[in-house]
Image (cartoon, rainbow, N blue to C red):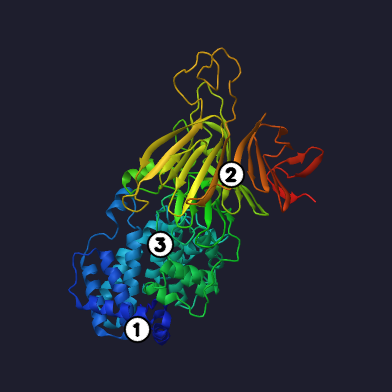
Amino acid sequence: MAFDYAQVSQQREQYLAQAQRPRWAGWWNDFLAAQQALAAAPLDLALPRLALAGQAEPLALAAALTADPALGAAVAARLTVVLDDDSPWMDPGHQRHYSELHADLLLAELTKRLVTAGGWAAPWLSADLATRLAAAVRQRGGQVIADDAAHGAWWADGHNSNWCAVLQSGLGFAALYLNEPAWRQRATVAITGVLDLLAPEGAGLEGCSYWVYCARSCHDFAVALAGTGDRHLLDHPFWSRAIEFALHLTTPGVRGWANFGDCGYPGVGGSHLFYAIAALTGDGRAQWLGDQVSGGAGGWADFLFYDPTVVASAPSEQPGSRLFSSVHLASLRSGWEPEAVQLVLKGGSNAWSHCHLDLNSFILTAGGERLAVDPGPWPYTDDYWTSVEPPQSTAWHNTLTVDGGDQRQPPRYRLSTDLAAGGEAWCALDHWHQAGGLTVVRGDASSAYADTLDRFHRWVVHLAPATFLIFDDVRVREARTQRHLQWLLHTLLPQERTADGLLVRGQQAALHLSLLAPQPHGWKRLADRRTTGHAEGEVVHASAFRPAWHHIWNASPRRPPHPHWEPAGQPSLYGAAYPFVALLQVTAAAGEPTWRAEPVTGDGVVGARLQAPGDEVTVLLRHREGAVHAAGLTSSADLALLRRSAAGTQWLAAGGAVELPGRALGAARPGDVTSGWLG
């Protein structure tokens, strides 16, 4: 039972030397004083078990480093109270929801805290207390986790779930504390599976905060295992790739995560994980992110894993935009300065853990101001897990609703990142292309709307630094009914209606949104959303754009209110294509838009022409088969772009060819994007 997490007792002198370095000297004095004060104060017996064990960990760390018996006695007192409570370690809410299980996150975390504190404070535990602790870790911790896993608990090999990482790391701690080889093997195999799934791009599919929890739990066990001389989990390739995901999914200024699904806002945690990654890989960007998150302070885990030889370096020289194709998230960013502009597009599967029905939704941030937001989650309840509550619904996200309904939702907790494995409710991000100040990506969420739509492709074109064009290629399924389409926008800041769209103005930045298609269109303000995904008291404002014919009553005797069918059997009045084109321009709060915009229309094509002094951009979205003609371009591409500026004439084609009169510009194969410049 010689358990010494992070080899604190074995490397006591090195840690004490760390405590005297300028980065940690002040922190160490404050930390030690706080632990001594806690040890001297009366023990609060009303605290929950997990909180008492949480006090025991830093007390035990301080005891191990100072050899102060008063601190060791304080650890023993807390362990005694925890062990005297004979009620189940599993959270009652989890027990109610997972009635066949007996292990959960709280049980695993309690096991880990007891093992860590008991190992560091071993010299101050009586023989009786040490025996009781070992028995509890075995019978109420490790054995419960092992039994549930053996009986087929969903998390046992659910490598895409934080539950797998947390519970298997709890089993691993118990195994190492009690020298149980079978448990150790099971935990090692499972944690390896989690890391293997994360490794291709270092990316997670449950949302950023759960990614941190998952990776941190894997690291916990990897460090504990390394104490036995087995470092292979710390040598896993995931650690060298993880920082890319963390960097790209923080908002500018590291003020929060791109908070899709059950990830709330504000706050970015996990500083000690980033310090640990820096120590493992020597990557200064991880050290920099740890500093940004901790604010230069941090907790006891930051202290343990901080490597002073790694020089922090901001990611200022690397590209700002990145597609994570394994989890279908795209971050389009103007740069890495705190004032940068960032749009994040959400793909993935509605079968993935902690998802919302939000495929093809986006958020938009400029510096410290969030201009287009995801409202975030509600508190977790039985209803939240067994039905679609408002924050999970499609209508609460910046995407498209059809007939007021939700995207499809299969059962969750698929065991891979294969989109199709979880059922027909997914969105693939593809057609990624970057060239000459342009970034293009497409989200194909057609399968998630297959009951009402034949197609929902969302194209995002980023014109650096602060302009975004969103082209939605929407084709409805033919039916003898009207389809109600709504293009949704959610903001924390008030929305002001303008002649062609909306103005969202903050203290530092403003969003100017122009809806260029459909023309004409309707707009309405929706009910405010209130969630716990934001600071207390904040309200999320919502509104919807829609085709102008979106109505119930027949407003005109010459124009019946059935745009998809005519009772006499005549052809559809409007056809199946319902494209949306939105221009999003971010400026300073009192600034004016860079571009003057006008819609482009033609047979089977919509688009936008943007003009600024010395610069003109034309983008076409083709929504029928065959070549289309508009704005002086002929295009068989799904998306075509032509830009004339002082830098020259730039073109782009996605999935087809584009040409000017008498001159072919270029062509891309289906599924590909290509671009170039006229010579």
Q: Nearer the viewer, residue 414 or 303?
A: 303
Label 3 or label 2, whichever comes before in sequence order: 3
For the residues marked 2 and 1, what is the alpha-carbon distance in whole angstroms?
57 Å
Q: Amino acid at mark 1?
A: Leu
**CA separation, marks 1 and 3?**
27 Å
Between discs 1 and 3, the one toward the N terminus: 1
For discs 3 and 2, the disc positioned in front in the rendered view: 2
Q: Is residue 395 left or right of residue 593?
A: left
- Could you tell me which residue is drawn at 37 percent across and 72 percent down? 299
Q: Residue furthest right?
A: 662
* Residue plotted at (51% across, 25% down): 549
State which mark lies toward you, 2 or 1: 2
Position in image of residue 45 (x %, y %): 18, 67
453 lies left or right of 663: left
Disc 2: which residue? 469
Viewer-side label of 1, 3: 1
Q: Residues within 10 Å of mark 2 (few under 14, many from 20)?
A: many
- Residue receiving disc 1: 65
Between marks 3 and 2, how big is the CA–CA gap? 41 Å
Residue at 46% across / 59% down in the picture? 211
Question: Residue 564 is drawn in which quadrant?
Answer: top right
Q: Secondary structure at mark 2?
A: strand
Residue 432: horizontal and vertical position, in percent?
Answer: 63, 50
Q: Is residue 293 above or below residue 536?
A: below
Q: Residues within 10 Å of mark 1 (few under 14, many from 20)?
A: some
Disc number placed over residue 166 in the picture, else none = 3
